[in-house]
Structures are given as C-alpha cells and as structure tokens.
Image (cartoon, rainbow, N blue to C red):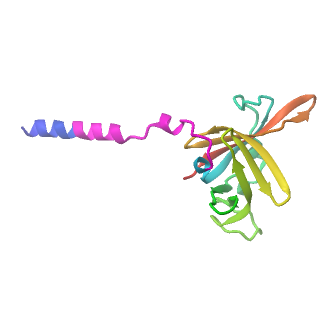
Amino acid sequence: MKKMIKISFIIALILNYSCTKENPEENQTSLKLTPENLVGEWRKIGAFKSTDSSGVDLSNENLMNSMDDCRKDDIYKYIVSNNSSNIIKWGYGNNICEDEGQEKNQFIEIGTWTLDERGSLNYNYSDVQEAYRILKLDREELLIREKSGILENDTIKYYFEKYKRLN
C-alpha cells in the first residue's frame, strides 16, 4: 500500500511539473502590433546592417561588439500615456559609464513614440524623428529596422536593432 501511495505521489509530481513548465514556443508567438504589447523594459542585444530588408539574414557582425561595455546593457522603457504622447525612457543596466552622473536603473525621458497596426514605430527626440518598422514582436524579443535603407558601395543596406524583453 505504501509503495502504491509513493508511486501515485511521484506521478502527481511529474504531471504537475509538466503542466506548469513554461512553453518556450508560447513566448515566441507573435504579438499584435499595439502600443500595449510594446510597453515594458527592453535591453538592446544587437545592432546590424544587412542588405536583407526582411531581417531574416542578420549574420553580419553585431555592431554592438565595438561599443563600450557600459552601453551594451542599456535599458529602454516604453510607457503608454493616456493624456499625452507615449514616452520612451533610457537608463543604464548593470554597467554604468563613468562621469555621466547617472545611476544604475535610473531612467530619464528621452522622447516620445508612436506605433500603428502596420508596425510603423516612430521616435521623436527633441528635433529628431526616426522611423522604424517592427519585424518581430513577441513576449521575449523585438526586432526593428530603419524604414529607409542607406546606399553603401552601390548597395542598399538596412540598419536593424534587436531587443530582449526584461519584464
């Protein structure tokens, strides 16, 4: 009888674990392109130039490799505002650049942003406007591309940024 109870207990534990285990495929399901789905904290994990405008082939060198370590873990916070423009804030991650007077996880407002259902993501910083296209948005990752390519050596190259969701 004790052996039967022990076996039943082990089976119950296994079933409970398998039912509560996070499904990685669920996190990679594309989200609807709405401001609410973009809200949160994101860390830039990649910056690339590619001739492939779809972002499928980003095998080129990660441009972040040449950046200072204190810039490689910066955090961008997207906030939806009901009574004004959506806000984007920037802050350091764990590595802080010296002599800049900012502390870890301290955020400053750097501009505003808009997003439409077609994936047009527009940033406004002071007098500068930047237009991007969202190519991928899921629970873990954001991939954006500058809308306009740049002509380099008779070839159009596109600039991409890849982000990991922190919350």
Against 70, residue 102 (above or below) is below
Query: Residue at image x 84%, y 33%?
Result: 157
- The quarter of the rendered structure image containing the N terminus is top left
Side of 141 where 47 appears, left or right: right
The residue sitting at the front extreme is 83
Side of 126 where 71 appears, left or right: left
* Residue 151, image x, y percentages: 90, 34
Query: Residue at image x 74%, y 71%?
Result: 101
Side of 166 where 55 appears, left or right: right
Residue 16 located within the stretch drawn in magenta:
yes
Query: Residue at image x 79%, y 45%?
Result: 131
Residue 92 located within the stretch drawn in magenta:
no
Side of 93 where 62 appears, left or right: right
- Range shown magenta: 11-35
The residue sitting at the left extreme is 1
* Residue 110, image x, y percentages: 75, 61
* Residue 68, image x, y percentages: 76, 54
Q: How many marks?
A: 0
Against 132, residue 40 (above or below) is below
The residue sitting at the right extreme is 154
* Residue 106, image x, y percentages: 65, 67
Principal SS element in the magenta part? helix
Towards the viewer: 29 or 165: 29
Against 19, residue 130 (above or below) is below
Q: Quadrant of residue 99?
A: bottom right
Towards the viewer: 95 or 13: 13
Towards the viewer: 47 or 111: 111
Q: Quadrant of residue 55?
A: top right
